[in-house]
Image (spheres, rainbow, N blue to C red):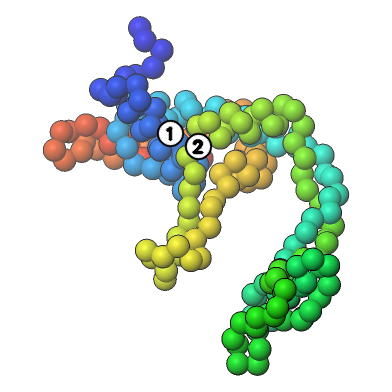
Amino acid sequence: MAMYRKLGKSSAQRKALLRNQVTALICYGKITTTEARAKEVKKIAEGLIAMAVKERDNYETVKVTAKVARKDKDGKRVKQIVDKETGKVLSETHRDKDGKIVRLENGVTVTVYDEVEKEIKKDLPSRLHARHQMVKVLNPVVEVPTENKGRKRGTKKVDLVAKLFDEYGPKYANRNGGYTRIIKIGPRKGDAAMEVVLELV
């Protein structure tokens, strides 16, 4: 007997299907699919969650200095004009009172940066390996706000690996496996394949 179901697809199509469904399950918490597919997705998803539970606290906190762009009251980056050769500030702003861009001879517009100290989580080797294993399986997800549908502005990438470590890791810390459940919802119209809801417990 084979170790996995072939699902009537070539290996490339099967991998793509399973990756998409695992990503959707981790992102939204539940998916509707056929029973055979759900059983395959369940195996992969439970493995990822088990990794997240095991490695959830396996990091060290490190202080780093980072450069962050200074912003004005409207949330736009502050820019100034500096001399090309010397780097001396020629003008504190690159726009005049009317909002037109100022042009100065031998001047270059640059963004003003401030140095801030941040605390970041630095993964230890085993957690980093787990992160790489998760990234291999999960597809990138972009969240689009409902009012800006079809526009790039306002979209943001969802970090599913961070969600696994920070949300699902602590949630299932006291649970030994069995992170998902399959609920049958009846045969599908058309081909009568058994449809199920696969959801996180």
Residue at 84 percent across and 54 percent down: it is: 65
129 up-or-down from 87: above or below: above
Q: Provide the residue designation for mark 2.
A: 138
Q: Secondary structure at mark 1?
A: helix
Q: Which mark is residue 32?
A: none
* Residue 167 position in % (x across, y down): 63, 46
Q: From this view, report whether residue 156 is shown above or below residue 44.
A: below
Left or right placement of residue 39 versus residue 135 in this view: left
User: Where does the image place residue 69, in percent across and percent down from the top left?
Assistant: 72, 66
Give me the residue at 65% from left, 83% from top: 102
Q: Residue furthest left?
A: 190
Say the numbered circle drawn on residue 19. Answer: 1
Q: Based on the displayed image, in which of its 4 quarters is residue 88 positioned?
A: bottom right
Left or right: 161 in relation to 9: right
Secondary structure type for disc 2: loop
Circles 1 and 2, Cβ within 8 Å, touching? The answer is yes
